[in-house]
Image (cartoon, rainbow, N blue to C red):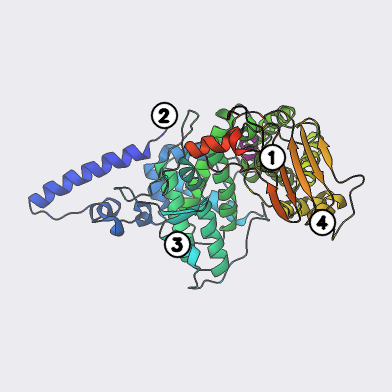
Amino acid sequence: MRENPSLFWSQSLSKAVNITKMALAKGKKLSLHPFLLTTLLIKNRHQKKSLIAQEKADLAWYCLHYPQRIKQLLANISLADDSILKRHSFSKERDVWHCQNLLHYYQESPSIPWLRISRIEPSGNTVEWGDRVLQNTLSFQGCEDQVPLRDDGHLDWMHRGPNADREWAWFLNRHYHLRDLFVAYKLTGNPIYVRYLNDQIVDWILFNPSTDNASLWAQWRGLEVVFRVVHWAEIFYGLQQVEEFTPAARILMLSSIQDHAYYLRHLNSWGANWLIKEMYGLATIALYWPEFTNAQQWLTFALDRLLQDLPNQIYPDGTHKELTSHYHTVVLSDLQQLGNLLEKAGLPVPQQLHQVLVNMWNYLAYSMRPEGYGVLNNDSDRNDNRDLVLKAAAQYQRLDWTFIASNGTQGASPKGQPSRMFPRAGQMVMRSGWEKTAHWAWFDIGPMGIYYHIHNDKLHLSVAAYGRDLLVDGGRYSYIRSKFWHYFRGSASHNVILMDGQG
C-alpha cells in the first residue's frame, strides 16, 4: 500500500491541536516536535510558512517517517560498485547510511555532464522576476496570480489562477516556476532561490502522493508528469554542488522519479501527441537515471511504443495528423529532444525516427509564413518558428531551410517553384518568393485532423502580402469552454462559405 502523507499529516495535526488545547487549559507547558509546533503557531496567511522548510535537511527524519518510500527507492537502485550501496539489512540507521552513499555517488559521478554546472560564487544579488516567485506570484500563459497557501501551510497545488482555468493548475504542476528559480540562482548566485526551490520540491512530493490510476487532474496527469521530470533533471544535476539543495530533497526527488516512471510505463495514454510526450518522458527518465534497475526496460518499452505509433501519427509528407501547426511543433520538439538525448547518451537514433524528424522539419520550414510564423490551423497559436528551423537546418545540414528561415539572406535557394503541396495533409502553401514581404497563402483542402484539436475550417483560405495579413485564421484562442471557444472552433470564424448562416 502506498503511503498517504496528506492523511498522515492531517491526522497528526488534528491530534496535536487537541493535545495543545488540553495542555493550555490545564496550564501545562508544551513540549512538541517543532514541525508540529510551527503549524500550531500559524496566525494568518502572511505568517504561514512551509512545514517542510521547518524540518531543514534532516534526512534521518524522512527515513523514519517515510520508510516505505525510502526502502522502495534503495531496493530499486543498482550501482556498479556494490560497496557504495548494499540492499540488505535495512534499518533506519542503515537506510540513512545507504541514502548518504547514494547521494555521494550522484555528487561525484561524471554522468550527465551537460546538465551539471560549476560552483557559483554566493551573492546577495536578486532578480525581480525571481523575487516574485518567492512570493508565490506566478505567471502562466500571460495570466499572473499569487498561489494561496492551504490552512496547513502548504502550497495549493490545485489553484486554477485568476480565471479559474484548469490549464493554469496544469502549468503550476509542470514546475516551470522551479526552473525559473534555478535560472535565477545561476544568474545571481543567491542561495535564497535554491532554498525556496528545495522546499517546494519537498512540499510537492510529500503532499501529492502518486496514484495507481490514470489521472486527468493537475498533479498526476501524463503531460504534467513529463514536463515536471524534465525540469527536475535539470535541477537535480545542476545543483549537485549546491548545499542548499538538501539531502532530503535529493532523496525524495529520486524516490518520486520512480513513481513518475511507473505512471508513464503503466498508465500512459492511448495515442495522439500525449503518447509521444509520455514515451519521450519515460525514455528521459531511463537515460538520465540509468541507475534504476528497470531503466533499460523503460527505455526499450518507450522506444518500441513510440516507433510503433509514429505511422499512426505522422503522414509521409511530414505533417502530424492532428493537422495543427502548434501541436506539430510540440510533437516535433519532443521527438527531436529524444533524438538529441540518445546521441548524448552514446546510443544510435533509430533510422525511422531520424526520417520522421527530417520530414517534420521540412514541413515546418516550407509551410512557414514569410515573417516566420507557423500556420494558425485548428488549435494553433501564433508561434514564431524561425529560430527552431534555423537550428534544425544547422543540425541536419539543410541549406534550403536556412534560406527560407532567413528570408534568403543565408543558405541556398530551394529548387523549383516556391509554392508547395502537402498532399496527405491536404494543404496548399502558395508564395511568390522567400523574402519577408512575399505574397503567401494557405489553402486547406484536406481532412479535418484527428483527436481533440479540430476546427470546422475546411476550405479555409489565409492570405498575407506586403508584410500584412489580409485573410486570417484566429487559431486556438482559449480552451476555456465558453461562447468564444465555440465561435473560434466554428466555421463562422474562418474564411469559408456559410449556407444560410450555418457552417
Q: Is mark 1 on a helix, strand or loop?
A: helix
Q: Quadrant of the C terminus?
A: top right
- Give me the disc on residue 1: 2
Calculate the distance from the C-alpha at mark 4 to the C-alpha at mark 3: 42 Å
Tell me the mark number nearer the camera, choosing from 2 and 3. 3
Could you tell which of marks 1 and 4 lies nearer the N-terminus?
A: 1
Give the residue pinned by disc 4: 435
Q: Is 168 placed above or below 353 here?
A: below
Q: Characterize the local packing of mark 2: few (<14), some (14-19) or many (20 or more) Cα atoms within 10 angstroms.
A: few
Could you tell which of marks 4 and 2 lies nearer the N-terminus?
A: 2
**Would residue 469 be seen by someone viewing this image from the given angle?**
yes
Q: Is mark 3 on a helix, strand or loop?
A: helix
Q: Characterize the local packing of mark 1: few (<14), some (14-19) or many (20 or more) Cα atoms within 10 angstroms.
A: many
Q: Quadrant of residue 366?
A: top right
Q: In which quarter of the image is the N terminus?
A: top left
- Give me the disc on residue 328: 1
Q: In this view, does 496 lie to the left or right of 126?
A: right
Give the residue pinned by disc 3: 132
Amino acid type of the residue that numbered disc 4 sits on in the rendered structure? Glu
Tell me what residue is drawn at x 48 percent, y 54 percent: 139
| 263 vs 15, nearest the viewer | 263
Calculate the distance from the C-alpha at mark 1 to the C-alpha at mark 4: 24 Å
Tell me the mark number nearer the camera, choosing from 4 and 2. 4
Was residue 279 drawn as part of the magenta stretch in this picture? yes
Q: Position of residue 187 (x, y in %)?
A: 57, 67
Q: Quadrant of residue 307?
A: top right
Instruction: Work out which residue is located at the far front of the displayed protein and give it.
Output: 500
